[in-house]
Image (cartoon, rainbow, N blue to C red):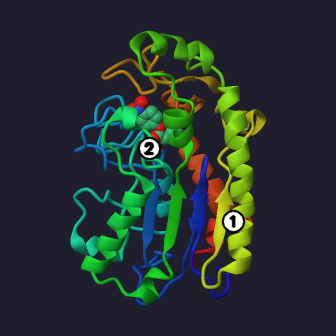
């Protein structure tokens, strides 16, 4: 636990963390009094299910390895916040804001939304989504209605993973005509390999974000931030874990699309794959990322474990 501190952030294009310690009674084994999650589809666990959007995955094969089946998680199984909640000793996964009880704000709520961005207009092309601004406003109303004490909120863990859509579904968006969409795959890798042009642009953002995290840590008291680098894994490390396929998705994605085809085929051994669909990772990788963030292998300057007991 970092002395006198409470928060962490996580950013993936943009992934930042702000974190916590124990205040008042916390459940046995639970290392922070509460855990709040903000972000896009990488962290979404069902908030988009009731929205009018194409960024919705409450169908198979999503959730094929999750005990409850498809829940709205953009993976075959658990997502990164699920693993963080497990590692921090929470008895249950943090539920989505959509449908969460009022009292749940005392323990944690997940506000993330597939397609969500930092900019309001991001992912207009996908339909309804919950922007970061709206997620924060949902959080403010949830904690107000539940009257969660500020002394407790100061010691919670907060994770934010957002920014990818501001590139993918905004800055780099192709004119959304059907003909132009057909050429998108060649331009951006076609779901096979990496989209170098996007990665280079995102690098600029991430480097500035790292600097911002350092700046916030130096200039804000009572809160600590850490940067989680989702892209620091390398092929050799993954191969040592038996994760050997990094250049294609596990599920079948139709040409010009990014998500798995409904009821489409999947690779037989999901544990060998990095990518579940064309933009989201498998449960196996989500677990590796969460553990590496928890133990500090991919974070700077703090590990998540330093934010919790
Ligand atoms: C890593 C990107 C985060 C995110 O929300 O990605 C999405 C990209 C595309 C779709 N979609 O096509 O519906 C949804 C989410």
- Rendered position, 204 above or below 256: below
Mark number, residue 143: none
Residue 75 seen from this side: no
Residue, disc 1: 213
Residue, disc 2: 41
Disc 1 to disc 2, how far (Cα)?
A: 23 Å
In the image: residue 135, left or right of residue 156: left
Q: CB of mark 1 within 8 Å of CB of mark 2?
A: no
- Expressed as whole percent of the image width and height from the top left, the position of residue 224 reads 64, 75
- Expressed as whole percent of the image width and height from the top left, the position of residue 292 reads 66, 54
Residue 287 seen from this side: yes
Q: Where ligand 1 lies, by image quadrant?
A: top left
Residue pushed farthest right? 236
Q: Quadrant of the N terminus?
A: bottom right
- Expressed as whole percent of the image width and height from the top left, the position of residue 217 reads 70, 74
In the image: residue 24, left or right of residue 143: right
- Rendered position, 102 above or below 222: above
Residue at 66% in and 26% down = 194
In the image: residue 132, left or right of residue 58: right
Q: How many marks can you see?
A: 2
Name the one closer to the observer, 32 or 53: 53
Question: Which structural element holds mark 1?
Answer: helix
- Rendered position, 192 above or below 224: above
The yes-or-no answer for disc 1 within 8 Å of ligand 1 is no
Q: Residues within 10 Å of mark 1 (few under 14, many from 20)?
A: many
Question: Which structural element holds mark 2?
Answer: loop
Occupied quadrant, residue 307: bottom right
The yes-or-no answer for disc 2 within 8 Å of ligand 1 is yes
Q: Quadrant of the C terminus?
A: bottom right
Q: Earlier in the sequence, mark 1 or mark 2?
A: 2
Residue at 35% in and 19% down = 264
């Amino acid at each position: 636990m970092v002395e006198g501190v409470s928060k962490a952030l996580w950013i993936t294009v943009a992934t930042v963390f702000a974190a916590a310690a124990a205040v008042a009674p916390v459940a046995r084994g639970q290392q922070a009094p509460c855990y709040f999650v903000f972000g896009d589809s990488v962290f979404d666990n069902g908030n988009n299910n009731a929205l009018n959007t194409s960024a919705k995955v409450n169908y198979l094969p999503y959730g094929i390895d999750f005990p409850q089946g498809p829940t709205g998680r953009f993976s075959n199984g658990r997502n990164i916040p699920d693993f963080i909640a497990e590692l921090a000793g929470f008895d249950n996964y943090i539920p989505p804001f959509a449908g969460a009880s009022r009292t749940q704000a005392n323990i944690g709520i997940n506000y993330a939304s597939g397609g969500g961005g930092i900019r309001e207009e991001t992912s207009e092309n996908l339909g309804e989504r919950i922007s970061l601004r709206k997620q924060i406003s949902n959080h403010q109303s949830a904690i107000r209605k539940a009257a969660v004490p500020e002394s407790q909120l100061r010691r919670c863990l907060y994770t934010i993973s957002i920014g990818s859509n501001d590139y993918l579904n905004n800055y780099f968006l192709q004119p959304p005509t059907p003909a132009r969409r057909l050429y998108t795959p060649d331009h951006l890798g076609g779901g096979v390999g990496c989209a170098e042009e996007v990665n280079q642009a995102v690098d600029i953002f991430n480097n500035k974000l790292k600097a911002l995290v350092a700046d916030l840590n130096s200039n804000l008291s009572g809160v600590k931030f850490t940067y989680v680098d989702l892209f620091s894994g390398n092929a050799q490390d993954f191969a040592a874990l038996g994760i050997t396929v990094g250049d294609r998705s596990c599920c079948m994605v139709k040409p010009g699309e990014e998500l798995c085809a409904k009821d489409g085929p999947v690779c037989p051994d999901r544990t060998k794959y990095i990518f579940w669909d064309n933009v989201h990772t498998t449960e196996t990788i989500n677990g590796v990322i969460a553990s590496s963030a928890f133990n500090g292998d991919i974070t700077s300057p703090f590990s998540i474990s330093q934010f919790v007991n």
